[in-house]
Amino acid sequence: MDVSFRFFKLALAPRLVFAGALYALAALAQVSLSAAAPGFLLVIPAWFFLAIKGASNKPRDKGLEEWRAVSNEEITRIADGIRQSKKLRAKVGGPVALGVLFLVAMAVAGVASAFSNPNLSLAFLDLALFSVPGLFFGRITVHLPVDMDRKLPCFLAIMDAPRPAGWVLTPYLRFDKDEEDRDVPEDMRFMLEPRRKPADLVGVQFQASINNGEHGPVPYLYAVVLARGRTGPAYGLLRTMQARGYTVEAGGDDAYGTVVVRQDTGGGGYHTTPDDCEALFGLMVKALEKAGA
């Protein structure tokens, strides 16, 4: 396996020689001068020779935005991929945690032996510093699409929610492209379409945003009714709908009318749990049925 370094265009063998020489000079300076600081100053340049580049599977996207309809299986595959990434992240993070514990143990041992055996104390501290490149340089970073991970429970909930026979719930993914022109999914939304619908009704789109919750970012699912214009019967009925705990906002233009239905944000309603998402889905199914779907 090829190993890349951050600094200096040198092969591996010369790097190890230079780093080893600096480590040896550091120890010699400490013993000769009976002081730790001069040696520590020589350790840091040695790290530059051992600075391995980290690796990551994060795609380098091109900043494109292309929405495409996909299958339910594709959403399930993304959910499985995210679960695997979380497990891999935990495995990769384990050695780092052990490295931190090792450094703490060496520091404690160094301080504990400082008065009874200064040379042993110095050896503990040097061992900790000499080990830093091996413990922390060249880390592997596992990419996790955080926003997708936060939104997924909302969409999985409505995928499993009951709906009338013949009604179609279509997932859409927003794709970017990586450097090798492969698809990179970055966002999702769903479209609900009744089997029979009024002429002016396109469907109901379920979208999710990320809000700043009390304990960090949280998903917020809402529904958007799409209609052809703002004069048709479906739009006229749905724009006046009322439901306890929800806010209804009519808008759009002469080409496409919209009715946004969202959970009230008062009283901590900035976060939609899977149960909230399923309730919103059920509400919209009933609303469409009343509108003649």
Image (spheres, rainbow, N blue to C red):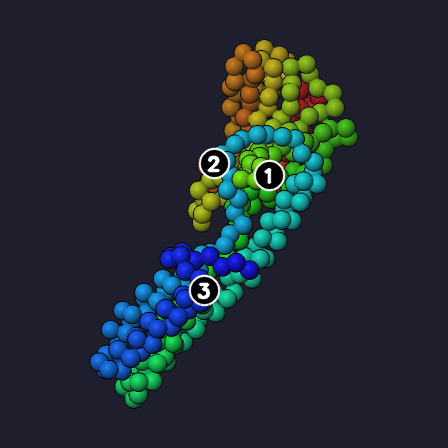
Q: Residues within 10 Å of mark 2 (few under 14, many from 20)?
A: some
Q: Quadrant of the N terminus?
A: bottom right
State which tag comes first along the sequence, 3 or 1. Answer: 3
Q: How far apart, in angstroms, are the residues tagged by discs 1 and 2?
A: 38 Å
Q: Position of residue 66 (x, y in %)?
A: 57, 30
Identified at 24% across, 73% down, the residue is 38
Q: What residue is pinned by disc 3? A: 12
Identified at 71% across, 25% down, the residue is 194
Residue 231 lies, with reference to residue 45, above or below; the image says above
Q: Secondary structure at mark 2?
A: loop
Residue type at mark 1 is: Arg
Residue type at mark 2 is: Thr
Looking at the image, do the residues carrying marks 3 and 2 touch, with CB atoms under 8 Å apart? no
Q: How many marks?
A: 3
In this picture, residue 270 sits left or right of residue 188: left
Along the line of sight, the residue nearer the viewer: 107 or 39: 39
Q: Residues within 10 Å of mark 3 (few under 14, many from 20)?
A: few
Which quadrant of the structure image shows residue 45? bottom left
Q: Position of residue 8 (x, y in %)?
A: 37, 57
State which tag comes first along the sequence, 1 or 2. Answer: 1
Along the line of sight, the residue nearer the viewer: 126 or 84: 126
In the picture, the disc for residue 251 is none
Q: Position of residue 233 (x, y in %)?
A: 64, 13
Q: What residue is pinned by disc 2? A: 265
Looking at the image, do the residues carrying marks 3 and 1 touch, with CB atoms under 8 Å apart? no
**Residue that protrudes farthest toward the right in the picture:** 165
Q: Secondary structure at mark 3?
A: helix
Residue type at mark 3 is: Leu
